[in-house]
Image: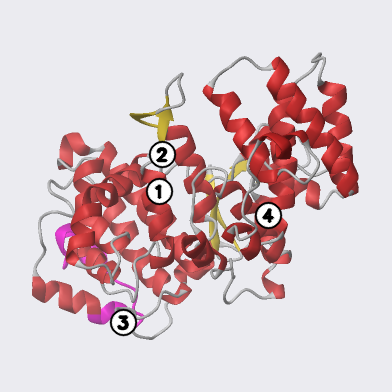
Amino acid sequence: MYLCIYRGTVCNVVISQESETGGSGDGRPPIIFNPDFFVEKLRHERPEAFTELVLSNITQLIHLPGAEFSQLLDEEPKTPNATAAGGFFRSFNFLKRKDKGVVFGMPLTEEGIAQIYQLIVFLSKNLHVEGLFRVPGNSLRQQTLREQLNSGADIAFSSGDFHPNDVATLLKSFLGELPEPLLTQRHLHAHLKITSLSLFDDHGSKTSLPDKERQIEALQLLLMLLPTANRSLLKLLLDLLYHTAKQQHKNRMSAHNLALMFAPHVIWPNNMNATDLQENLKKLNSGMAFLIKHSQKIFRAPVYLREHARLQFADTSMIHSKDDLELLSVSGSPFMSACKRSAARVRSDSDSHTEEALRELYRHVTHHMPNSAKKKKLIRQLGKQSTPGTPVNENTTPTSKKHMRSRSFGGLIKVMVASLQVQLCVL
């Protein structure tokens, strides 16, 4: 497993060993497979479709009122400094570029990341130091190191002039001096909602047990909406903290301890008053610990998103959500033919066909599904998506036309209706 940069975004790639083992026999270099290639291609070439796709799936996992949802809408996945000459894949060369300019206290840039990356590399070789990130370093040595980084210099760590505690403390200072948290203030409410995701019991009531699977999926989607520079540095930082926690038997720094050290610099908002901060402190710290523990998963695109992005460029049927992808593996179901007809109606974008499909789906849910919390939830979802004249509309109270998410992003409803129908087909 290696890292690559796609338009400035750090991503995982898998190297095929076929040529190394003599499989190709012609001396060609190993083949690089990037599972998220088409996701990043979609982000760059069709940013509006990418944003709509990500947001439609986030809203199925967490409830975001209008104001909180609009904050995510305002932040498009831009790729600063990306040019056509860069191609789809960029090398790690930008991390080696040391352009002169102030790094500390400035907005995050690729040049700033390239400088700070020197600290990350050095610390990754000193994870055994006890109390790393907790024990403060020498202030004079930190000031010297800060000045060198601001000048764009290559730091000679091999000289032994700097202790790992100096470097670790300065890394936290850099994060703390950013104009806004690395996770951005716009994402604060979404992160709080993700931290609160919990499992449901058989009666449909929330339990105190966290739903880790949904939390990971929601984070995978949310982090895709981060600015490119923030996402790249966050990936590098969490990788470092993850491997630091793996050596807690030496450094005495668990994921929880590291979260307490970094949450104020990564996730705490700058504009939150003391009372609100105190109320959400536990959630913010536990959210940071969760990011560290699952850092090897949260930067992967969900499988259904990868497939949707691939099909976008294959000019064939779209897969919008996890439920759509699961449908592909279902065979022998007596309801499959009805499901296929419903999917065809959605693609035709005909109002009359959509109403007929909703009637069919509603009858299947009410008459064939056993009574359960899942059944009640699906009926409520059908009620929100219903149109005049459908059975759902006749048995439920119509939803308000002032629904903020529908008004803010018109294309989301089409995606959600299609996803809901496929979900019901699977059931």
Residue 32 vertical position relative to residue 85 in the rendered view, above or below: above
* Cα–Cα span, label 1 and label 3: 37 Å
> Which residues are drawn in magenta?
147-166
Disc 2 marks which residue?
A: 197
* Crowd band around label 3 with a 10 angstrom C-alpha radius: few (<14), some (14–19), many (20+): some
Q: Amino acid at mark 2?
A: Leu
Q: Residue at x 27, y 70 (%)?
A: 174
Front disc: 4 or 3: 4
* Proximity of marks 4 and 3: CB atoms separated by less than 8 Å: no
Q: Which mark is residue 412?
A: 4
Mark in the foreground, 3 or 2: 2
Judging by the rendered image, the residue that carries numbered circle 1 is 193
In the image, what residue type sits under mark 4?
Answer: Leu
| Residue at numbered disc 3 | 150
State the residue in front, 342 or 43.
Answer: 342
Query: Picture quarter containing residue 162?
Result: bottom left
* Callouts 1 and 4 close, C-beta under 8 Å: no
| Amino acid residing under circle 3 | Asn
Dot 3 or dot 2: first in sequence order is 3
Q: Nearer the viewer, residue 30 or 397?
A: 397
Q: Is residue 159 magenta?
A: yes
Question: Mark 1 to mark 2: distance in Å?
Answer: 7 Å
Local SS, label 1: helix
CB under 8 Å between discs 1 and 2: yes
